[in-house]
Structure formats: C-alpha cells, structure tokens
Image (spheres, rainbow, N blue to C red):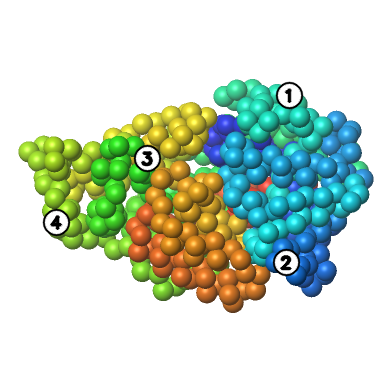
Amino acid sequence: MLHLAYDREIDVLNALTSQNLVDIQFSMVEGLVTTNDENTYIPVLAKEIPTEENGGVERNADGTVTMTWDLQEGVRWHDGEAFTSEDVCFTWSFVISPASQVYNRHEYEGIVACDTPDEHTVVFTWDGVYGYYPGLFEVVLPEHILGGKTAEEVVNYTPYNRGTELVGTGPFRFAEWRAGEYIRVVRNDDYWRGPEVPAIDEIIWSFVPDNNTRFTAMKAGQYHWARIQPTQVEEARQLDGYEVFLVSSNSFMHLDLSLNTENARALFSDAAVREAMFMAVDRQAIADQLLQGTVRLADSPINHTSPFHNADVPSPQFDPDGAREMLDRAGWVVGPDGIRTRDGRRFSFTLLNRAGASDRIAVAQVIQAQLKDVGIEVRFSTLESAAWTQKWRSGDWEAVVSAWFLPADPSVTGLYACDGSNNMTGLCNEELDELMKESDRFLDFESRKAALDEVQLRLADEHRSLPLYFNVVPELVSDRIEGHRGSGTNFGSFWNLWEWRLR
C-alpha cells in the first residue's frame, strides 16, 4: 500500500471543475493526452497527437481546420462499459457550456463540431488554427454516467463529485472518501495498458494540511511521499530513506486585484494606483525569507524555463518611497490612523485566503505588512476550499494571492481576456484581448513566440496582476518508490502513476 501525505483536502473529484490540483483525480481518470516530466505532451487515450506532419491536422479552403484523433482500443471504464469516441464528444459538449465552470473552457470554444465516424475515431472541426490544441482533453468524462444531464447538473452531481459514481479509465478505482481524513483508491485489475500494471494494489491520499505536521510525519516514516516547504529542504536532505526532488514548476504565485465590487472599483480602477501598490511589495524579501532562496522572481506568467518566455519584460521594482509619491499624486492622503483616504473612503480592502494554503497565506501576510507601510490596509477572509472556490467563481472578492499552472505550450488568454474562463477579476482591455487571441492562432513556434512576447510586455504595462515568483515544489520521496519522475506541469508529478512500484 502506498501512503501519500497530501497538503489539503480537495473540493470535488470532477477533474474538469475542481479548482485544486487534480493529482488524486488523475490516479483514476485519464484524457486524450498528458504531459511528462520533460514538459512535453504525450498521448494517453489517443494513439498519437495529430499534427499536419502525420496527416491528423488538415487546413480547409474555408479557413476551418479538421483534426482527427485515433483512440486506443480495448479501453473500459471502471464499471466495464467500453470507452468510445462518444465519451469524447460528450466531454466537449459539457466543457463548452457556459455553465460548465471548466477552468479553461474558452480554449475549447474554437471547436465547432465533434464527429464520431466510428467508436475509436474522433474528428473535431475547428473554426480556425489554434496552437494550444495538444493540451486539451486531459480528462474525458463517462457519457453513460453523466449523459442526459445539463452542464449545471453535472457540475453539482454529488455522486460523481464525491466518488460513489465516479468511473474512469485510469490505473486506480475509487474506493472511499472519508471527509477530513483521506481518499482511498484501489488497483484497476482491468487496466487497458496490461495486467502487469499498476504494480501497487492500493493508495491512500491522507489530508495533512499543516506543513509541520506533515513533515514530522514524514520524518517518522509514516508516508512514502509528500510535498514539503522550502524551509524544510535542508533538514529533509539529511533523512535516511528519502530523497528530495526540487521540481521546477510551470506555476507562478501572483497577487490579483478585482474590479467586481464597488469598493474594489473605487480603489483599483486607476492603473497608476495598481502600479504603486505593486511597487510597495518586496518580492525579493518574500523569496529570500519565506522561500529560503529556492525560487526565482517572476516578471511574466510564462516561466523563464519556457522557450516562450520574454526576457525583456521589465520586472516590478520594490520602491516604497516611489509608491507613496504615486499614491499622494492620485489623491490618496495618509489619515490620522496611518491609512490613506480619498473622498471619504479609506484605502482598505479584503484579501481572500483559502484555508490550508499555508504558503499563500504566509505570502499574503507579508504583503499585508508591506502595504500597511505605505498606508494601505489589508484585511483577510479565510474560507475552506469548497467555499473559497464558490466565492472566487462568483467574483465577489477584492484581492487574492493565488498560483496559476500554465501548460507546456502556454496560453494566457483564459487568465486575462475580458471573457477568459479564469478571469474572475473584472479587469478588461479589449486591445490586449486581441493580442492574446492572436497568439493562439499560430501553429509554428516563431509566429507564436513573437505574439506571446508582445502579450507579456502589454500585461506588464497594464499592472493587472503582480507576478511574485515561479514556484519550485520540493517533493520528499521514499527510496522505496520506483518510477517517480517529478513534473512541474499543470498535470503534476503523478502523470505516470501506473508505472510506480513500491519496493
């Protein structure tokens, strides 16, 4: 049995609607593709990823694009039903519904038709060229379980979300979810890759949100795997029977500001005010003191390890005196209590925290102190994971410290476009929108790189979101585990769980 110390209890088991990492879900569900530890897309339920070179992608005279995916044969859902092309088209129809709440829904909207010439072939018709297509359909939903329901009903369907009716095609099957304690999965004896895999009979994902408790349990040998904090790395390297892996992540921590409430609009509508706020945040101190120098400061959403990173994007500079001057010029005057006011309004807002996300809360506390130093008051509202997700989706919040994972082939349109499926801030720039959408319309690297370079520069000029640092995720792994290949992509380090063995 494999024992994993997971850093939080997840919200739902639907991997398309969860707002957490979907490591646990990916032990049970699969998609057409995933990404490996080399930041490369690889096929899973698809035999190969279609390209123009292999004939799977064809440009049509009317500007549309036809894309053919050949599916693996002999794949069955955990309840014995055959996996077919109908499941893929059902998943597409769910995702594109405005009520689906899928985190990257907009990326599927260019598909105008999904056809099933046979059980093992799916043909998508796109309204044009879209460069990010290999990163879609990382999850396929079971039509025979969820078909016939509206998108809203699927989102709220408790039997699937809590596991009692969750079926996947993955190496493990759902067994039990004990709230506040763990999720247990067991070996799928009918796994399509062959009877010899997976080699592990059972996995327990224990919820251990406290960093110190989790590390203490690892030191006591209670678990085989855990994510730990950067401050714990040096001590962890001295532990017998474990190895520390510093996984360079495709995610970046950032401070987001909203325009969705009346107070937020009054405070944050002026880009100069947002710039002043960002100048008041000492990101280097956060990296050096909280993260023990294990991370690199971010100047863009796209990681410096990516070929699409623009090294010419100006990095936000810490300048509290300059921030005070800009706020003074904007009419925000320090009051007798040390907090700035303008037209009778105090410069005070609430930052939304997610309980258990101790790294983000620690960053938020530092930002709170640094902004207070220039006359800005930050209050906290801390909610449990499911409630946090609901609040965030509603747009009824003013600020948040969060982290986005970007795919191997990055698209930022969903994060920052006016109608982006993950833009819950209310910030909108139509000119920037067109630049982002243009960056998604290229298949060749050079054109896509040039467009994304310009997007990154414009995002920096907008002061929409303050990039803090690129995450490095320390993973503490028992030397009894074979097959672990840590991955920093949005699909996580469990991408090849079917290959893991426990000695």
- Residue 466: in sight, yes or no? yes
| Residue type at the position of mark 4 | Arg
The reply to whether dot 1 and dot 4 touch (C-beta < 8 Å) is: no
Q: Identify the disc placed on residue 62.
A: 2
Determine which residue is flagged by label 3: 260
Label 2 and label 4: CA atoms lie apart by 54 Å
| Residue type at the position of mark 2 | Asp
Residue 112: x and y, percent? 71, 52
Near mark 1 (Cα within 10 A), the count class, few <14, some 14-19 or many ≥20, is few
Between marks 1 and 4 in the image, the one whose residue lies nearer the viewer: 4
Q: Identify the disc placed on residue 164.
A: 1
Kindly indicate the quadrant of the structure image that contains residue 308: bottom right
The reply to whether dot 1 and dot 2 touch (C-beta < 8 Å) is: no
Residue drawn at (77%, 50%) of the image:
114
Between marks 2 and 3 in the image, the one whose residue lies nearer the viewer: 2
Residue drawn at (59%, 63%) of the image:
440
Element carrying mark 1 = loop
Q: Residue furthest front?
A: 62
In terms of depth relative to the viewer, which is nearer, 379 or 453? 453
In terms of depth relative to the viewer, which is nearer, 27 or 226? 27
Element carrying mark 2 = loop
Q: Is 94 above or below relative to 470?
A: above
Mark toward the start of the polypeptide (2 vs 3): 2
- Left or right of 462? Residue 186 is right
Mark toward the start of the polypeptide (1 vs 2): 2
Determine which residue is flagged by label 4: 329
| Residue type at the position of mark 1 | Thr
